[in-house]
Structure formats: C-alpha cells, structure tokens
Amino acid sequence: MGDLTIEAVTTARARREFVDLAYRLNAADPNWVPPLHMEAVELVTPGKNPFFEHADVQFFLARRAGRVVGRISAHIDHLAIAMDPAQGMGPGTGNWGLLEAEDQAIAHALIAQAEAWLRDKGMTRVLAPMSMSVWEEPGQLTKGFDHPPTVMMGHQPERYNDYILALGDYTPAKELLTYELDITKDFPPLIQRIVQSGEKNPRIRIRNVDKSKFDAEARLILDILNDAWSDNWGFVPFTETEIKYAGKKFKPIVHNDLIMVAEYDGEPVAFMMTLPDLNEAIKPMGGKLFPFNFIRLLAWLRKPRVRTMRVPLMGVVKKLQASRLASQLAFMMIEYIRRNAVTRYGASRGEIGWILEDNQGMVAIADAINSHINKQYTIYQKTL
C-alpha cells in the first residue's frame, strides 16, 4: 500500500476534490458522459440533495503522497432500512458507492474503509454500489461498456467490476437491465391490434401531461409511482422534499407530448415518463456550463433534436397489475410516445429502464415490442 492514506471528507475543499477526481480518471473513456459540475457537487452536498435528510453519509478520499487517487461514499438510508427485508433492503443494510480508484489496491482499501464505517454504525450487510439512492445510479455496469449511458444512468469502467469480484466475498443480489429498440419501426401487428382495441374502449383515456399544471401533474405521477412500485425489490418511497426536488430537476426536460397518463373510468391509473437524452447535449461540454455552453444548452432544451429517448419511469397502480388492462395501457402509452418522439423530435432509438431482471411484466412488454438488452447493472451484496 506504500504511503496510501484514506481520510474522511470534512471540508468544502475536500468535497471539491472528491467531485473532481471522477473527471480526471474518466477523461480518456469515450463512453463516459461528464455530468454538469454543478450537479455533481449538488449530489454530494447536504442541504442541496434531499437524500441527506433521511440518510447518514460519509465520503472518503484516498491519497498517495498528498495526491488524490481514489474516492468512495458510505451511507445508510433510513427509509431503506425501514423497508421489509424481503424487498432487498431492510434493517442492517448499508451501502457504498461513487467509487473511483486508480488501481485495484486503492479500490480495495476504499471498500474496506466503507465497510468498516458501516460496521461501526451497526450495519450487518452491504448492498453496493449504490450512488447514492436507489433512485439515482444504482449498480455496477456489467454489460454495455461500448456505448454511452442515457440521461440518469451510470457508466463505470469494466475494471471496477473486476475489482469487486477480486474481493471474493461479494455476490450478485440483483441485475438491473435496460432495453433498446428502433422506434422508427412500427410495433408488431399484435401490439397494433391491442392499441387499436384500447382506442375503441370509451373507458380508456390516454392523455398528455399538462406542463402548465406541473406541480399537480408531478404529484399525480409520483403518487402512482409510489403505489405501483411499492412491492418492488429495492423500493424506497419518495419524501415530500424529494418530490419537489425531482420536479424542479426534471422540469427543463419535460415535454407534454412525451409523458402520458392513462385514465380508466376517469381515474388516473398509469403513467409513462419519457425524456429526451440530455446526455447527447452535455457530453461535449466536459461538465462545464460557462462561458458559452449554457447558451447551447438553453437552445437545446427549448427544442431538443435527439437520437435517443429514454423511458426512466413507468407504472400501473397495483390493483390493475395482474390484469390484461395493465399491458394494454402500457402499449398504448408506448405507441403514442413513440410516434411523437419520431415525428416531433427526430428520435430513432428508444431505451427503457432500468428494469429488474425478474420483473416478468415489464420484461414481457420489452420483449413484445422487439427491444433487446443493451446494458446490465449488477448490485452486489456482502455480509459484514
């Protein structure tokens, strides 16, 4: 280990070093998308990221001869440990994430430090990597290193997965999948018939969201989400602060015709959120908005022209999930958004996910529209 030291991040300067390291270590990776620096800082700053309101978090830096050579976060989400253990989290479960390291020895020293911190806090199990909430960038990329991630998805070097496996005591807990498809092509005839049948049903209404009523629409969608996902592995409910934070963060890339709400007998029962791939716009910026990139970004946000559209969230209320109606509503929303994405935004590619590997309903929908897995993220577990 030589002169390697690991220190807790306790100052604003160390926090900046923590953030900046990712830009240096990933600069040569053509498929890494540098996040906007201000957002990367916000992620790790108490008082700005509402995750800190319900989590204990400690960041660590590794130094060699005074130079920063690695970083990691260790955290305990109190909402997660309050969940039923059958859903993956539960009492005694902590996390580490945001790993960056110049080599395997540094990575192993950082992981050991994070584990020790969790153990000292009474945790008996670790799920990782989790950077930091399950709603942010969970999992280590294990398939799909050859192309950039879409908006809100992570990208880590393949060597980091090798580092985790080399420890010998981390085993896969869950696989998260993303699916891609060519959206310029019509869906198979069976799907078209299902959509057409739904269009003849007077009890079904598929509508765009109304951005002029943004707060109310965001609340509606997140209420459906909290109900639809509440039994899913890894689910952690959104807090009131997080609902407002998510709304503020998403608003610039929300477009009325890319987010649909499905109503049945006048009741909102499902939604599908689609976002133009912001990563296509920010990748060339190197994380910097000024002096001129903010002008380019504002112009892009007003009328994005993109190759890829991503569906990060989709949900049907629990009471309908075992019914044929659930898949019919899903196919109708997917088809309507597909048409809008192609004709109004010039998109040719769609990405759906992440989807839990054992979410049979969503996997079946992905298969039915001729999509295929393009990325896989693995969440590992270990007993402490």
Image: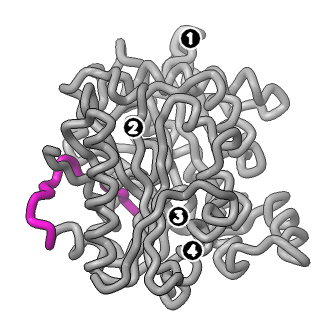
Q: Main secondary structure of the magenta part?
A: strand
Q: In terms of sequence position, does the residue under pointer 3 or pointer 1 come before the other?
A: 3
Residue occupying the point 86% across, 68% down: 294
Which residue is denoted by mark 4 in the rendering? 33
Q: In terms of sequence position, does the residue under pointer 3 or pointer 4 come before the other?
A: 4
Residue occupying the point 53% across, 27% down: 238
Q: CA distance from mark 3 to mark 4?
A: 9 Å
User: Would you say the residues marked 3 and 1 are in contact, meaning their CB atoms lie under 8 Å apart?
Assistant: no
Range shown magenta: 166-181
Which numbered circle lies on residue 76?
2
Which residue is denoted by mark 3 in the rendering? 150
**Mark 3 is on which residue type?**
Thr
Q: Is residue 317 above or below residue 3?
A: above
- Residue 173 drawn in magenta: yes
Q: Nearer the viewer, residue 370 or 101?
A: 101
User: Would you say the residues marked 3 and 4 are in contact, meaning their CB atoms lie under 8 Å apart?
Assistant: no
Which numbered circle lies on residue 267?
1
Q: What secondary structure is marked by label 1?
A: strand
